Image (cartoon, rainbow, N blue to C red):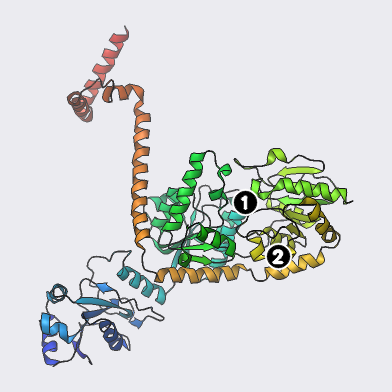
Amino acid sequence: MEPVPGHVSGFDAAQAVAEQAGRADVLLLWPDVVVPEGAPERLSEAAGTDTNVACAVPIVGETAQIVPGSPQVRPRVERVGPPCLYVRRAALDLCGPVDEGFSDRCVRAGFVHVLADDVVVAGAEDPGGAPPDRLGAEARARRLARVGLSRPSLTLDARSLTERMTGTQLHTLEVLRALHAHGDTALRVIVPEPIGSYAAAVLDELGVDRVGYEEIRHGRVPRTDVVHRPFQVTSADDIGVLGLSGERVVVTHQDLISYRNPGYHASADDWHHHRRHTREALGFADLVVFGSRHALEDAVVDDLVARHRARLVPIGADHVSAAEPVRPAGLAEGDFLLCLGTDYRHKNRPFAIELLTALRERGWDGSLVLAGPPVAHGGTRDEEAGEGVADLGPVSEGEKAWLYEHAAAVVYPTTYEGFGLIPFEAAAHGTACLWAPVASLADVLPPELGLLVPWDASASAERVLPVLRDPANHVEAVKEAARRYTWRATAEALRDVYLEVLTLPARLASTAAADALAGELARAEWEARYWKLREDIGPTGLSLVEPPDRLLDEEAQRTLAGLARRSATRGALLGLLRAARRLSRG
């Protein structure tokens, strides 16, 4: 039914227009309202989405326009009215006249109202009213309209950017660079305290907005459309910070190594806590990102994430260190294999020593250099002694670059990785890498390039020797495989994930998890205050008010507190107590 448009100055005029319209629907515009071309048709479409729709209203904004690419969520809204109102004739017949109570009478009669979330009108004040539930359909529709007219706002949880530099820090920093370069998101970053000097320099160069943990934790900054943590969650507090940072939550889960391995934790309790936090985080996230098909399937198999909420976004391999190569001090002359990374057991560094022994037995005259920091739990440092083995410990970025460039080959005998960057980094420096085609390495690289035979040192040495003599073909094959993995492609895929997650309805599980976590964090804060208070009061003060001693009853406590609060009596009270103390000592 074609609507009859009417410009009205009040509800009396609105009813007059409705009466003059015959059997037609009515489009009512209050004074100074500007509507975009095509708005009446879209409002009519919105009103026609269900047989019991009474009215449709647009979004009120600064500029009248049609939202491009709107998914047309068409959420139900509780109340409607000025400055723009599309009214269906059936609602007028049953619930008229059009006055201040018309909206409520329609709802009580069984009608609903809808938001035409692809139409923005201007030239009038927003009618205001109670804000929509931020996890509900109306909030989602309004958010999508805003994003459709501008760009999504994103918080990146970059609290991994401490002074230590490992694959996690590299991943976080390169995601940050790529998203900033892509330019299609309004980006801010949660930084650690203190932030690593290398990361601070990059953020200064990019000019990205920074926020601290405390600002987020105490609600001093608004939520962005999306928050993304590009590395694994390790605590309930991490999850709580994500919920306070963005309306929709994306988490990157790199692998399940710590989830599966109790040896990487200080105690069985710590391991179980880690597993619980992992399950909570993946259940809380609206979408979960994985860097390889193997990592994704691993999480799906364990029911940690439903397949429809898992997204595959390979990371980039085209980063180049800007550090000037520096030869590590104390490094002996001669050919060497490089085994780079921490000494976690799954990194399998003892196998690199076995491989060195097998190669020497076959005439290769070189050594093995281990480079990387020790771990607190689950390391193999005590098993890594051997002839021709040098352990450099942690190395700088400059030292790492020098080792990559001068190694005869890089040994990467890991048994499990979520992606595996080291073969690509080695090839970028013109150096061959020796790995086994296991876990994600069988996904992201051609399996035939994996020369190690799991885990047979003798058979591996036979396959490796030709590459040590002539690495060029192997290096070029890895470089060819690396062309698929660019940080630009990662940024583009992540932006698609951010836009998709904004279209998804809020999940009851996520909402319930958010409420539970808020309660858990509040309880933890009160517990911290309680224990701080006990510490401040000390055992003497506690004996006055707590069982079993409780030297002062409730009335005495109130009396002393009242006297101590008043300036007129505080001095006299304290003086009397000090005098009594001196007398008791005498």
Residue 26, image quadrant: bottom left
Within 10 Å of disc 1 (Cα), the crowding (few <14, some 14-19, many 20+) is: some
Cα distance in 3D space between marks 2 and 1: 29 Å
The disc label shown at residue 74, or none:
none
Identity of the residue drawn at 78% across and 65% down:
474
Residue 365 visible in the displayed image: no
Front-most of 160 and 126? 160
Between disc 2 and disc 1, whose residue precedes? 1
Residue pointed to by mark 2: 447
Residue 109, image quadrant: bottom left
In the image, residue 57 sits, relative to residue 266, either above or below, namely below
Element type where label 2 sits in the image: helix
Residue 276 placed where, x, y %?
45, 48
Residue 543 visible in the displayed image: yes
Residue 112 placed where, x, y %?
21, 76
Amino acid identity at mark 2: Pro
Q: Is 365 displayed left or right of 68 in the figure? A: right
Front: mark 2 or 1: 2
Front-most of 435 and 138? 435
Identity of the residue drawn at 30% across and 70% down:
138
The disc label shown at residue 165, or none:
1
Element type where label 1 sits in the image: loop
